[in-house]
Image: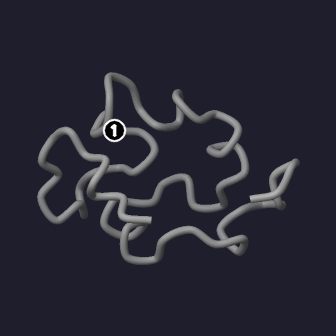
Amino acid sequence: MDLRSFCLIRVGDGSNTSFWHDVWKGDQPLAVSFPRIYALDIHRRVSFRDRAMVGWSVDSLRRIPRGGM
């Protein structure tokens, strides 16, 4: 998934932008927009840069979401 294509604002290299807690997409943080995924994420303090580099995997979540991925 190309996370950068969803950005409405410029986040620079993303190292100082929190993936979950800063408002970089839409009008509220992703933690508020997607609370169920946020609750499962092991790396809640991840920067945008690190999330974009690593991406998503089952290893990033506490458990597999109900209904699959």
> Which residue appears at 23% of the width and 60% of the height?
14
- Please identify the quarter of the rendering in which residue 22 is found: top left
> Which residue appears at 32% of the width and 29% of the height?
26
Left-right relation of 48 to 9: right
Could you classify mark 1 by the number of other residues whose Cα lies within 10 Å: few (under 14), some (14-19), or many (20 or more)?
some
**Type of amino acid under label 1:** Asp
Q: How is the image coloured?
A: one colour
Against 66, residue 43 (above or below) is: below
Whole-percent x and y of residue 38? 62, 44
Whole-percent x and y of residue 56? 56, 68
- Please identify the quarter of the rendering in which residue 46 is found: bottom left
Whole-percent x and y of residue 31? 53, 36
Against 52, residue 10 (above or below) is: above
Against 57, residue 68 (above or below) is: above
- Residue at label 1? 22
Q: Nearer the viewer, residue 55 or 46?
A: 55
The quarter of the image holding the C terminus is bottom right
Left-right relation of 3 to 41: left
Whole-percent x and y of residue 19? 40, 51
Residue furthest to the right: 66
SS for callout 1: loop
Q: Nearer the viewer, residue 40 or 45?
A: 40
> Which residue appears at 36% of the width and 64% of the height?
2
> Which residue appears at 16% of the width and 40% of the height?
9
The quarter of the image holding the N terminus is bottom left
